[in-house]
Image: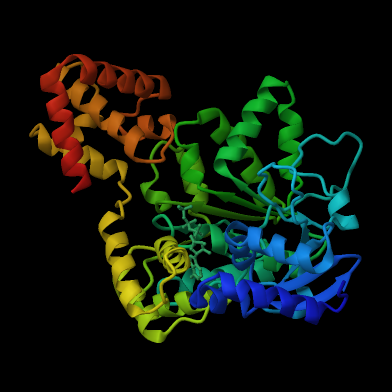
Amino acid sequence: MNNNHLQVWNNCLAVIKDNVPPISYKTWFEPIVPLNLENQILTLQVPSHFFYEYLEEQYIDILRKTLRKEIGNSAKLEYNVVMENNHIANAKPFSVVVPGNNGTNTKNRPVSMPSDKEELTIRNPFVIPGIKKLHIDSQLNPDYSFANFIEGDCNRLARSAGVAVSENPGGTAFNPLVLYGDSGLGKTHLAQAIGIKTKELYQDKTVLYVSANKFQTQFTEAIRNNNKNDFLHFYQMIDVLIIDDIQELAGKEKTQNTFFHIFNHLHQSGKQLILTSDKAPIDLKGMENRLLSRFKWGLSADLQNPDYETRVRILHQKAYKDGIVLENEVIEYIASHVVNNVRELEGALISLLAQSTLNKKELNLELAITIIDRLVKNTKRELSIDYIQKVVCDHFSLPIDVLQVKTRKREIVQARQIAMYFSKTLTKASLASIGSQIGKKDHATVLHACKTVNNLIDTDRGFKTQIDEIDKKLKM
Ligand SMILES: Nc1ncnc2c1ncn2[C@@H]1O[C@H](COP(=O)(O)OP(=O)(O)OP(=O)(O)O)[C@@H](O)[C@H]1O
């Protein structure tokens, strides 16, 4: 049996080369670097996390067979992923054991090596009796760093403010810093980048990222368990508090009230608040005025759609991170056709890579044209509740503000119910948030509206036709 890692891997490659298409071999096997062979564990270096996942999904069988042939039945495979910012020193090893032949089909998962620090870390708790200084898991994703955030005209102000805040948290005029803009434009990424940079510069500061939904759930649980004070104290101990998607608190008065107290306490103690929202503070509905007025104390910076040059740079960076080399013409084609937001750009790139490998096609402009055209046609536009109200009112020839009026007039009540129904089915907004935007109603009213519309669709053919027509208009 062979013990030399280079020889073992070369022998494996010889078999793999005969069994996979040349394009796949070139894309997925040539970039792999064998690092080590010890105790029947072969360690391979791969260029990215995506690359590792892809190998595991598509090629685990052939990897298992060839490895066992070379090093025996207890062969194991470990991957070493070069960290995506390409600092080799930061290489993050994790191991994946080649599954045994026990017939189970379990998907391999990476196992991160727990460090001492991680073992001590407590995951977002809010009651630790007797402990003064907590070590809190900041809930930050290392991929969302400033280094990975491409700057363009679309985000320059927000990014610069973010850098300033991370260099001097709580000490600039940007408190709170409110980052707002449409979905997929980088609000979460930027907010997290501020947290990551702050942690790098100020190791003793407690940074916490939490989504507004999670904050709301924790609050509800704290009330149920009678420990609202612990909840408050926990949040009041944070130095840099990042709350994502603050619009989700619309209509949730008690949570807003508690957040108001946390906000005041942190602000008065010179702590930093960073909030993200899908709308500018001035356009947020269902929020208490005293809270909205505080959001305006600092800086509200918007994120806009990236322009063509920025889209090209983002695509180059994402391809590089995934260890894939793309022709400029392919990148340029994607950048000029996928224009809505950065999340869609990323999705387009991943579809292209997957299609190229699964269908064993060369990753060239021809393939990009086929895939991207299909994708762009099928991309659903993200609908806003305002737009839904407009389409529903147009359909019934009603003025749009009539849905906000307190009235029991049947036609208005029904139009409102239909707008609520479509908002629930076509957006990610919560019942409370829908209610607060359509006629200032509560979540129970929205729930009732959805049930009523569903019942009528099942029982009234004329009504169903109307709903189908509105649906078509909304999806046009
Ligand atoms: N300027 C940028 N440079 C690099 N990547 C970006 C940039 N902007 C956004 N992205 C990437 O686009 C994806 C979507 O970004 P993100 O989740 O931050 O959007 P969002 O505005 O918070 O969306 P949502 O409101 O739907 O939560 C992420 O993978 C992020 O890394």
Q: In the displayed structure, would residue 385 be above or below residue 18?
A: above
Q: Please tell me which residue is depicted at 58% across the width and 76% down the height of the picture.
A: 323
Q: Is residue 191 left or right of residue 225?
A: left
Q: Quadrant of residue 273?
A: bottom right
What residue is shown at x 47% (from left), y 47% (from top)?
293
Residue 361, position as x, y percentages in the image: 41, 72
* Image: 381 above or below 59: above
Picture coordinates of residue 145, whole percent (x, y): 62, 68
- Give the vertical position of 383 relative to 195 (above or below): above
Q: Which residue lies furthest to the bottom in this view?
A: 328
Could you tell me residue 141's position as x and y percent? Answer: 65, 59
Instruction: Give residue 355's quadrant in the image.
Output: bottom left
Quarter holding the N terminus?
bottom right
Residue sitting at x 33%, y 63%:
340
| Above-or-below relation of 222 to 284 | above
Name the foreground residue: 204 vs 262.
204
Q: Where is residue 131 in the image (x, y as percent from the top left)?
A: 90, 41
